[in-house]
Amino acid sequence: MPESPSSSAVARHPVQLQPMQVPKASDVLANDLRERILRNEFPSGTALPPERELVTQTRMSRTTVREALRILEVQGLVTIKTGRSGGAFVQQPGGDALATSVSLLIRGQQLRLTALLETREAIEPACASLAAKYRTDDDLAALDAANTAIGDLDLSLESFLQANVDWHLAVATASHNELLTGFMSALSHAIYTSTENKAFVDDDVRRTTYKAHKTITDAIKAGDSAAAMRRMTKHVHGYAEAVVQVEERTKIDLGES
């Protein structure tokens, strides 16, 4: 006797599902607020609704709301003030936010010094070229002050390296390009950390650095973009070659003193 339809086995096709990543509620809220801030729905200085109101509007827990605000604070999109007139206030991301993000990438990935120097070779000549076009009197004063310090052979290693960072940042600042300034800020401080060792710096290096900086500064003062780019290219390439030779001998890695 044939089986009735009701008693026959139901054919099932094998189904394979992939694991699903469900975002945290705090990430969802932070993403929504971030997009609104970047679309300028909340101009810089605007106070976001109080925690209690955000909890009511989003139907999320107070803990979730606080975590979302902390995410935005770390990203430099809000500043959180305490007290009676406190709260979360919107701020537009600036060069500092970019520099912080790049610095975290450099340290987190433990990038080697050679990678940092290659990146600087790609970026800094453009900074010098733009600086020759857009520099102000204040920019030129900053370049001169930093290089004067570099020329002092009695300066401590730490002070020399800081003056070197100051000069390179002054070139980037004189470009009046926020992206380049942010990248150079992160790169310069990372290179400072990597070369804070006497093996990298002696009196000859200081003299050579001072002279190279002066020729680049002179081109920037003269408004000669081509010369500024050419001289900066020669300077950073020569420095990179010298540092790599020392690094190969000493095996100094990023973050080690």
Image: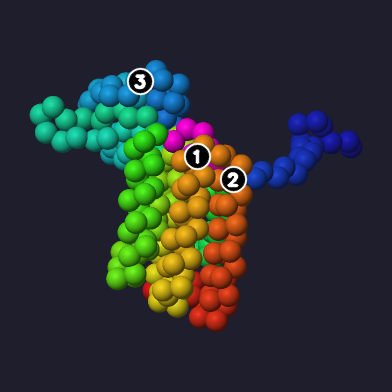
- Secondary-structure class at tag 3: loop
- For marks 3 and 1, the one nearer the N-term is 3
Asked whether residue 24 appears in the rendered view, the answer is no
- For marks 3 and 2, the one nearer the N-term is 3
Question: Can you identify the residue that label 3 sits on?
Answer: 42
Question: Can you identify the residue that label 1 sits on?
Answer: 222
- Secondary-structure class at tag 2: helix
- For the C terminus, the image quarter is bottom left
Color encoding of the figure: rainbow
| Disc 1 residue crowd, few under 14, some 14–19, many 20+, Cα 10 Å | few
Q: Amino acid at mark 1?
A: Ala
Asked whether residue 160 appears in the rendered view, the answer is yes
Q: Amino acid at mark 3?
A: Phe
Spatial CA distance of label 1 from label 2 is 9 Å
Image location of residue 8, percent across then percent down: 79, 37
Spatial CA distance of label 3 from label 2 is 44 Å
Which quadrant of the view contains residue 129?
top right
Most distant residue in the left direction? 84
Spatial CA distance of label 3 from label 1 is 43 Å
Find the magenta span and give its range: 128-135
Question: Can you identify the residue that label 2 sits on?
Answer: 227
- For marks 1 and 2, the one nearer the N-term is 1
Q: Amino acid at mark 2?
A: Ala
- Do residues under tags 1 and 2 come within 8 Å of each other at their CB atoms? yes
